[in-house]
Amino acid sequence: MSMPSKEKRPFVILYGSQKGQAQSIAEGIAEEAEQHGLVANLSCLDQNEEYNLEKERAPVVFIVSTTGDGEPPDNTLQFVKRIKRKTLSPDHYKHLCYALLALGDTNYVNFCNCGKTIERRLKELGATQFYPTGYADDGVGLEVVVDPWLEGLWKAIKEASSKMASDSTARLKENADDSAKVIPDSPVPDVQLRLLSITDPQNCDSVETTVNKDSKHATLAPSSPPASSNLRPGSTVGSTGLASQSLSTASVSAPETRIGDDGVPRVALAACLTCSLPPLSESSLNVPALPPPYLDVTFQDVDTPEQNVGPLNKETLHEVLISKAVQLSRGDSVKTALLLELDILTSPTLTYQPGDSFDVFCPNRAAEVDSVLCRLGLQEQRDHHVHVALRKDTKKKGAQVPSHIPHNSSLLFLLTRCLEIRSVPKKVFLRALVEYTADGAQKRRLQELCSKQGAADYNLYVRDPSLTILELLTAFPSCTPPLSLLIEHLPKLQPRPYSAASSCLRHPGKLHFVFNVVEFPACSGRPSGKRGLCTGWLFDLINPHLVFPDKAESSNSLPLPKIHVSLRPSCSFRPPSDLSVPFIMVGPGTGVAPFIGFLQQREAERKKNTEAVCGETWLFFGCRHRDGDYLFREELEGFVSSGTLSHLKVCFSRDVRGDEEAVGSAAAPRYVQHNLLRWSQQVTDVLLRQNGYLYVCGDAKNMAKDVNDTLVEMIKAELQVDQLEAMKKLAGLREEKRYVQDVWG
Ligand code: FAD
């Protein structure tokens, strides 16, 4: 039965999100639905009581990200498991019409794997695609694909919805034998083509032409002169975004002069975080819709300030003592690599295996929390209890108080332990900040940074340098948002995972881990460099107690501090349990950490079982300089002497000469993949003929991809097959969990 034309048509949005990106895109779609005459039912994929795909007769839009080694986000695991059940018949989802947006990062090997898995299964189960899938790449900026995909989505939903309502779903499927034909006059052929060529730099521009009245963006011309606010006095700023404005374009030529509200002229000779140059400064802007506010915050003065002790209660949380802190890198190394030893004897349930990692819960830096309080004018309220509730009149669809906001904790606790105040503000957050910015030039620049036209500037000045809200507020002094806006837009403070770098067979009651202190250089908007949140915090904690390479003991006799950790067991990053199975480890830099655990474990097992026949072990390690960054050198050479490690292949990317074996050779291997190639025959033999394993671990995203590409080349050459066959072979090894990655960065 067809619906009355004025009735808003429903559709379903389901998201699977690890860090909140997919969720925020899904929420954005839900918010915009109404203005397109649609009603969105939004759910997270793990809230399966809120949706029923088995009976769904409205279009379904999936927004899913991928995490780790191509894994589904935590809140999507069960859904993927359910749809993968072999007992489901091929027409299980015959009635279902879907569109899917997959988020991923091409720096990792299994790009958009979760989205691809869901899509494959939906198709296998008979579902019909009503709009081409978007594969958005965080490596180049999600928006390159997400924005045009969203623009075409509305028309596609409406058409799919009409078809589903007027025809029977069965007829819809009968008439189409492939997804491209489902909607004969496919609503977005342009977008489809562009999605296939996202690397084409012109693509971004051409997408502009698809902006139409359905666009989620409002058009905004530059102010003239730019000194004044570019929102006309009295212009309406509603939940649908800025009112479309058509102010005359100022003809400004570089160097551009802007007059701030303080009357001081500012000359921009070069673009920076706070200043743009033509053409951007003269351009009309498409800015995102204003996200509707949805939280109310009230304070309550309390008699006894709460102790800001540790992270929120988590059943699996352990407070453990740091028993040793050693600097592994030497003086002049660019990176500072540290090893921490945790005393886990007091936590008998904290049992780990080599290959596991564990989360470290770190607080935000006190000085940064103070600065945020100061910028919000809330120093006096730091110990007050914060009560966060939903705004009664909110227009946000499916609004909820975020689950990481505790009831009645102090403001200090909220900012120190719950909110990731270091996160990079998304464009929609910048858009919301515009509303709280008094100075016209600053307002315009914030609009530029969140606009389509300013996408490159956003990447250059905000995303790539990982600028934080505090740094933005410092650069835009007339911006004074309320606390509620920060709570609405800042994600949950995440613990940082680290790989276990020890075996408890070798170090009973101890857990080691290794990390580089992350350094963020100064940039536009950040006058001086700073350290990573967790690694900087750990560094400050243990600095007075550090043991240096050439010194036996720390001179400091004070007890070391305690930290909060919880275990993250790994399913597949484990050395083979059978000692006779050979394996290869690729771990440059701190990526060697889990392999120290593997080798300690193996050494202990070999000692226990002297008769055992042991398979070969290979370790490919790489770093910049032999003298500065060769982590665990003595221990690794010890493993070679004892026969635990059969082959240690090391390369130094910045030393003039390569490894020992390459001295005098022009082609000294520079990176681990070059060394792999050099030992191609032996490596492929282990993998393809001896049923061996290959593990890759490291902090360089590109490394994992380079290693993967090299493996494809090696298999091609070894088996004399083409690229596709070699890729399939490698995919097979991955399926069998004989090729496993643990990569971060
Ligand atoms: P943040 O303040 O969170 O800043 C991190 C940002 O800095 C990132 O967005 C990135 O853009 C940038 N960055 C620059 N260099 C690095 C780098 N080397 N690592 C991460 N981000 C970098 N790290 C280790 O040092 N040793 C380990 O054994 C280890 N094991 C891990 C295991 C897993 C499963 C995962 C997911 C991550 C692991 N990491 C490891 C990374 C670690 O969790 C942190 O991301 C890292 O220490 C930076 O944290 P931070 O709070 O200091 O930096």
Image (cartoon, helix red, strand yellow):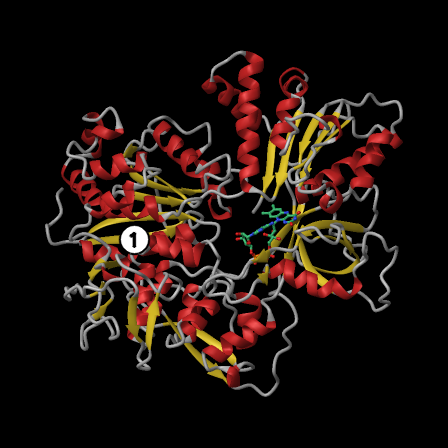
In the image, is 532 to the left or to the right of 136?
right
In terms of image quadrants, where is residue 634? top right
x then y, percent, for residue 456:
35, 52
| Residue 571 in view (yes/no) | no
x then y, percent, for residue 676:
64, 26
In the image, is 680 to the left or to the right of 480?
right
x then y, percent, for residue 396:
31, 63
In terms of image quadrants, where is residue 565? bottom right
In the image, is 326 to the left or to the right of 373?
right
Quadrant holding the N terminus: top left
Asked if 375 appears above or below 317 in the picture, the reply is below
Asked if 633 appears above or below 314 in the picture, the reply is above
| Residue found 46% across the figure and 82% down from its top | 377
Q: Local crowd at mark 1 within 10 Å, few (<14), some, or many (≥20)? A: many
| Residue found 20% across the figure and 63% down from its top | 221
In terms of image quadrants, where is residue 131? top left
